[in-house]
Every structure is written in C-alpha cells, then in structure tokens.
Amino acid sequence: MQRRFSLSSITFVDGLAITATVVALAGVVWSPKLTNAVARATGSIKQVEVSVDVRHLQVADSDALLEAIREEGTVSIVIRNQPAGRVGLMSVEDISRPLTQLLPNGTVLEAEDTSPARGLHARFRLKAEAETGPSGVVFGGTKLKIGSPVELEGRLYRVNGFVSGVTIP
C-alpha cells in the first residue's frame, strides 16, 4: 500500500519546520561573507586609497600624536555613523598652511603659525580593499565619496574628518 503526498497532510509543525529551513537557507545565501566572496571572485573588490582630512584638531603635542598614529599603522573607520572595520594607514601628515605676508617690496614672507587656537590640520592616507562598481566605491557596506563624513579611531584618538580623495591604483 502506497501513501500519496498531499498538501492537506502537512501539519502546522511541518509548516514551521519548512519555513525555518527556507529562512536558514536564505540567510546562508545572502550572508555578507558569501557576498564578499562572490565580489572577490568577480573582481569587483580592489585596493583603494582614501585620503581623509581632519581640520582644527586641538592637540597639546601635535608631533607626538602624529608619530603615535604612524607607529600604530592601522585605524578603525566609521563612515556615516556605520562601522566599516580597520584599514591600513599609508601615511599621516600635517597639512597646516603657513601664514603668508606680502611685503611692500613685492616679496612674499611665509612663517609657521604657532597660535594654539588654530589647531592641527592633518591628512590621513588609508589603504583598504573595497567593492568598486558603476556607482562608486562601497566600503564596509557604505558608499564612500569625496565629502563623506568619516570618523577615525585609534588607541589614543578619535577624530572626525571628511573624505578628500578616493583613488583606485
């Protein structure tokens, strides 16, 4: 005697089990790790260099801070209030502009501004792997474009800045 399968023989518990199985499979298929693996296999993930400018940072010893940042070598990045992981630090430099004065004889005199009220202006050059596509660079699930607000965090600091350059070498 053979039993035939019919939809009327499915119980409530069977329906819940089938639903749980379908949801679990969907979670595996759409997981970020699998999406990242597919993006890596298709070649849409590339090395990206990002410049982040930080302005008016009030620091007691700017040279010591810049040296500590260089020694650390990596920073945590937050893009539009969304954590995007840790990235490599290529360089950090002081981009504060000197004071300029035009003298009556036509020469230009430049001097370093030692005023503490002015603060430190720094440029962080970061290197990381990001997904590239027709809409731009997607970094940590967030589009990264010039002018995007970012937060950089290290062991001794947390600074807010903005993206000033994105290059794909």
Image (cartoon, rainbow, N blue to C red):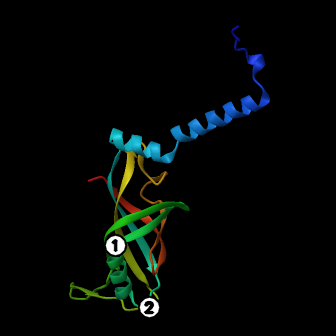
Residue of label 1: 73
Q: Where residue 131 sits in the image (x, y, percent)?
A: 39, 48
**How crowded is the residue under tag 2: few (<14 C-alpha within 10 Å), some, or many (20+)?**
few
Q: Where residue 137 sits in the image (x, y, percent)?
A: 40, 50
Apparent side of residue 53 relative to residue 160 in the rendered image (left or right): left
Q: Quadrant of the N terminus?
A: top right
Q: Where residue 78 sits in the image (x, y, percent)?
A: 50, 64
Where residue 73 sits, quadrant-wise, is bottom left
> Hey, what amino acid is under mark 2?
Ala
Residue 60 has which mark? 2
- Looking at the image, residue 30 lies above or below residue 166: above
Along the line of sight, which residue is nearer the eye, 20 or 116? 20
Residue 83 has which mark? none
Apparent side of residue 168 relative to residue 25 in the rendered image (left or right): left
- Looking at the image, residue 70 lies above or below residue 36: below
> Hey, what amino acid is under mark 1?
Gly
Where residue 72 sits, quadrant-wise, is bottom left
| Front of the two marks 2 and 1 | 1
Give the residue at x 66% y 37%.
Answer: 20
